[in-house]
Image (cartoon, grey):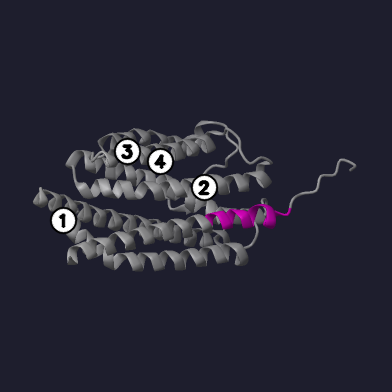
Amino acid sequence: MHRYANPARFLKIARVATPIVTLLGLALTAAGLWIGLFASPPDYQQGESVRIMYVHVPAAWLGAGGYLSLAIASATALIWRHPLATIAARAIAPAGAAFTAICLVSGALWGKPTWGTYWVWDARLTSMLVLLFLYLGYLALSASEAEKGGEGRAAAILALVGVINLPIIKYSVEWWNTLHQGSSISVVNASSKIAPELLTPLLLSVAGFSFLFAAIVLMRMRAMLAQQRLDARSRRLAEALA
Amino acid sequence: MNGVVARPDLWSSFIVPAYAITLLGLVGLLGWAYMSMRSAEKRADEVKRK
């Protein structure tokens, strides 16, 4: 893993991977959303509103999954002090925050026709809102640390502390009485309660959103590495002139 | 009117807005990431050539 964490080697791989991952993400997302909107049948209970699932569920999974990868990158940065891990964490945070916001908004638009309300202080909804605040807190703290030339240790610690929210999100529908339904797909048991006609576009959207998430992270990492090269050159120039 | 409440149209009131917000968010995020990467790498290459 350390072999690929070398910035020069990473850039070599990222330059090849970025267009491939982006195109895969766009194609799979387009296919999943098209089938979800026009080709899949309505749900026998929820009717047409089930189509919101094809944007809501992938956004929710990536919001939570993104936070887990943010925490892993932060732990790697804290333990091994690898600069690429800090850059990865800083690249993941805006994408994770955006997917969490999309999850909350699409969930509100699904909640109104299903529950009769856009928002309720339900355990699942509230823990997802807390996740968005954790992302925003991380973004603010890491931007402030980066401005002062810091390594981002306080932001990394905040990211690790926030991991406690992930099991709360996952098990909120079991620990408390909530309006939000329980999970319909089990990754551990590789089983699903969803009919295949609805599951296919959902899995396509999940795959597409995941590739888009990866593409955004790769692009942000490349931008930050280029900025670091610029800053290093400016410092060397200033030192030479002094 | 006689206690009858009209249900909003699911497509125009909820499904289309959910997809529109999602697609705008995704395209905006992807576009921002791409533009920031292009401009940073272009500036770094220009400085390297000088």
- Give how far across and how far down residue A206 sits, in percent: 46, 57
Label 4 – label 2 distance at C-alpha:
14 Å
Residue underneath mark 4: A135
Residue A138 within the segment the image draws in magenta: no
Label 1 to label 3: alpha-carbon separation: 30 Å
Earlier along the polypeptide chain: callout 2 or callout 3? 2
> Which amino acid, by three-letter code, is at mark 4?
Tyr
Residue depicted at 58% across the width and 35% down the height: A178
Mark closest to the chain's N terminus, 4 or 2: 2
User: Which of the marked residues, 4 or 1, is nearer the chain's N terminus?
Assistant: 1
The residues bearing labels 4 and 1 have C-alpha atoms spaced at a distance of 29 Å
**Circle 4 residues within 10 Å: few <14, some 14–19, many ≥20:** many
Give amino acid for label 3: Ser
What's the distance in space between the residues labelled 1 and 2, CA to CA?
Answer: 35 Å
Q: Position of residue B12 (x, y in %)?
A: 69, 57
- Within the magenta stretch, is there residue B14? yes
Residue in view at x 63 percent, y 57 percent: B16
Q: Which residue is mark 1?
A: A3
Crowdedness of circle 3 by 10 Å Cα count: few (<14), some, many (20+)?
some
Taking the view exactly as shown, the residue that stands out farthest to the top is: A176
Asked which secondary structure carries label 2, the reply is: helix
Q: Which span is picked out in magenta?
A: B9-22
Residue for badge 3: A144
In this picture, residue A78 sits left or right of residue A191: left
**Amino acid of disc 1:** Arg
Frontmost of labels 1 and 3 is: 3
Mark number displayed over residue A103: 2
